[in-house]
Image (cartoon, grey):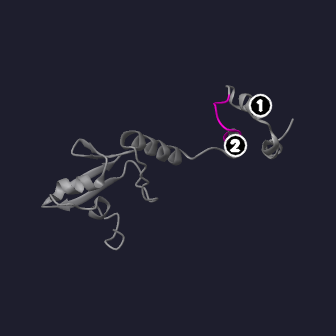
Amino acid sequence: MATHDDTLGALTTMSSARLRAEWLRLYKKPAPDLTADLLRRGIAYHLQKKTHGGLSPATVREIERMRRHLASTGEVVTLPTTRIKPGTRLVRDWGGASHHVLVLDSDFLYRDQRYRSLSTIATEITGAKWSGPRFFGLRSSAHA
């Protein structure tokens, strides 16, 4: 039986019919209607995933967040690489009151309402346009 490395090397010379057979063997379902190049990439990914592991849960969540955003707005927006972990509580004193925001997987909870953006929350608190990460002390003014 061929090793994963042998199969990866052989992918470059496989015909479309052989690639489709390999796809069926690995994925246990017929290959989608893709070009030979994309079939090779899909097979290579599957083999590498079996050997080295797949995407991290954080990467899968980020891809899903981007997919949902694309489906709803038609555009892809990337977030800064520094992410706040879900469960984090952000606190800011403003106008004589303490404001608490709970970080969720894909949005924020403030006063029992969900918000997609910290900036929206900061604007609601202050009545003025603010960078949410800056308002909550996640970025300095030099990075804003």
Q: CA distance from mark 1 to mark 2?
A: 13 Å
Q: Which mark is residue 17?
A: 1
Determine the residue located farthest toward the right in the rendered image.
1
Residue 56 position, x and y percent, is 56, 47
Q: Quadrant of residue 35?
A: top right
Q: Main secondary structure of the magenta part?
A: loop
Height in image: 59 above or below 32? below
42 displayed left or right of 134: right
* Circle 2 Cα neighbour tier, 10 Å, few/some/many (<14 / 14–19 / ≥20): few
Q: Secondary structure at mark 1?
A: helix
On-image quarter of the N terminus: top right
Q: Residue, x 77% and y 31% (percent of image)?
A: 17
Q: Which residue is mark 2?
A: 37
Q: 35 and 93: which one is in front?
A: 35
Q: Secondary structure at mark 2?
A: helix
Determine the residue located farthest toward the top in the rendered image.
29
On-image quarter of the C terminus: bottom left
In magenta, the rendered stretch is 31-38
Q: 113 and 119: which one is in front?
A: 119
Q: Residue, x 69% and y 26% (percent of image)?
A: 28
23 displayed left or right of 77: right
Q: Is residue 37 magenta?
A: yes
Q: Quadrant of residue 7?
A: top right
Residue 43 position, x and y percent, is 71, 39
Identified by mark 1, the residue type is Ala
Residue 119 position, x and y percent, is 27, 56
Identified by mark 2, the residue type is Asp
Q: 26 and 110: which one is in front?
A: 26
Q: Which mark is residue 49?
A: none
